[in-house]
Amino acid sequence: MSQTSREGEGLNKVLARPTLVGRLGVTKRTLQVILGALWVLDGLMQLQPEMFSRSFATQMIYPNAHGQPAPIAWVITTAGHFVSRDPAMWNVLVVGLQLAIGVGLLRRSTVRPAIVAMWTWSLVVWVTGEGLGSILSGQGSPLTGSPGAVIIYALVGLMVWPRTDSKGPVLKKAKYSETVKKFGFATSPGAKGLIGSSYLVVVWAGLWTLSAIMWVLPANRQTSSIHQALLSAGAGQPSWYANILDSLARNLVSAGPELAWLFALASLIVGLGPLVSRRPVGFFVLGSAIELIFWVTGQGLGGLMTGMGTDPNTGPLVVLLALACVPRVLPVESESVSPLAKLLAKSRYGTIATLAGAGASILLVATYPVSAFASAQGGSATSSMASMASMSSPERPTGGTSSSSMSAMKMDTNSIIPGAMGSTDPSWSYTGPTLPVGLATLLTTVTNLTDAGHEMQTNSCTTTPTRSQLESALRLVQQTTQAIAKYQDLSVATASGYVPVTSKNYPVVHYVNPAYMNEKDVLDPNHIQSLVYAFTPYGPVLVAGMYLMPNINETGPMPGGCLTQWHAHTNLCYSNATGTIVGFTPCPPGETNYKTPFMLHVWQVPVPGGPLALDPSDLQAVESAIMAQQSGQAPAVNPIPPASSPSSAPVNVSRAPTTTITSSSSPLLAASSLHRQPGN
């Protein structure tokens, strides 16, 4: 050896000193206890109310099938079918298993069976609950938690397997060098696990090299990839945290490609550094710091505050993996042989082939053009949204609004991913009783006038949604639909504080709850700011829940990317006396023009384009409401005639005027907050 050394009792001894891990006395047993505590946390998180509902399958399992090879997608979908039949029973079993694993790791005598159970369960969850970390779908990002938390659980399990006593040289009080016979990775807390000290660094390097490969995937090199990931992480979070993520996202709107390459390079440095350096601790510290930054940003703290998190995500687990790898004792002088040199000595060709394969993978992925990826994904992402909706219509009380109508709808690309605004589902058609010509004219005229003052928060938003954005959009639809089901009865809404802000003389009326117009209730399904009702001849129908930002010009979070766009209206007239919206500009005396806050609709009736459609007209909203009543999906107080036919008599809608109107006909032109862009 090149270090200052001594010979004693036939053993080499070198001048060495402990690292922080050594001074803190971190051992294999320490890691077992931390790992057990994390599994207990996972079990407790699984006790959240949403986990006992169909959300367990619809939000945790089904979305993972998106973009997967057919066999993997079949396995995931089949698992979802099993769970969705009795989610409460399956969740109880999951809770019990995870708590058993955690408690088993906390007790010395049961560590081995607990780790075996952990490996088995981790494989099941990695496939069904994490979709193989999105590795095969091409849409995984280390920022949001790929390649998955449970795979890191399994890797740590390899290192904490109780083969022998893990106690080694720990020099807690040493400020200066002392003479020891063991140093380097042989003193790591995970050195006496199943893989030994030789391959600790290989595991670390492999994980970070995989991260580098994923960073240069076309999905992560898109302009808005970082921006959208941060917005998605804010879904369901407390408003203060969601606002932080939203603010960060706004500052990184187009930084996707640059940050992707930066993080790919950083991942390679973190992963390969310990292989070639004789001072590896700094690389483990850097890797832990990067992962914790990802944890508080793109991973949203693992969803701990959303009510839907199932584990802390990869951030804390990568730190735990680093603790397992960091040597507790390092020589004062550099070793003459690096870990990479040792690997080459053990298996020259295998090591070279592995490094060459990793380099080739990065090169292949990095040279795949983003434009080709976006073109290939344009339609599939949309069809996935439709298929997920069809698999996961939320449970509603009998007589509820049309959640199943949503799930039955076919959605085309233009209606889900804006780009050709004004397009609708070509298979959609009205099947209810014939509407009066005057009513249809009124609704169409108001639509056209509303379009003239339509302002999108994000202009020309056409970016293909990622898998995480699809999940977030679906989650928003489900949670909103479940939360506002009680407001199918208009009297419940008014008793809860919702007041009309548009004219009740018009068939579509918007109600707002002023108490929810604040920052803490932004995008909170349980405190949705506005409800939209269509008044048909057969009774009022809740056609949409509408989120409103509390302040004018304040932008809203977009957890579903371009699937969750916000818009405002600029040409509405407010009554100076009542404060309600009564017409369109130019405003006559007694009325004032104000721009509305940005708003986002979640439709509860089968409008063309689905629950997050951007462009249904008021006519289509009313027609969809009637069809929902006709099919029993919405309450009806009067009998509904058969579907349209040549002999059908016109229906009299007493609430709606039947005269053609102009922009100056104030009260009859109550704002309809339609989803069309100007010119369509």
Image: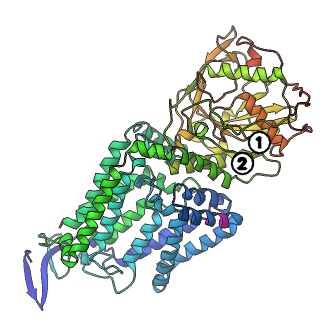
For the residues labelled 1 and 2, the Cα–Cα distance comes to: 22 Å
Q: Residue at x 26, y 65 (%)?
A: 355
Side (left or right) of 374 relative to 452: left
Looking at the image, do the residues carrying marks 1 and 2 touch, with CB atoms under 8 Å apart?
A: no
User: In the image, residue 404 lies at what x, y percent?
Assistant: 74, 49
Q: Is residue 396 magenta?
A: no
Going by the numbered disc 2, the residue's amino acid type is Ala
Rendered image quadrant of residue 129:
bottom right
Which one is closest to the eye, mark 1 or mark 2? 2
* Direction top: furthest residue: 589
Query: Which one is in front, 173 or 27?
Result: 27
Going by the numbered disc 1, the residue's amino acid type is Tyr
Q: Is residue 82 magenta?
A: yes
Q: Which residue is mark 2?
A: 408
Query: Would residue 180 be visible to someone looking at this image?
Result: yes
Mark linked to residue 487: 1
Whichever of labels 1 and 2 marks the residue nearer the N terminus, that label is 2
User: In the image, residue 46 lies at what x, y percent?
Assistant: 59, 64
* Direction bottom: furthest residue: 9
Main SS of the magenta part reads helix
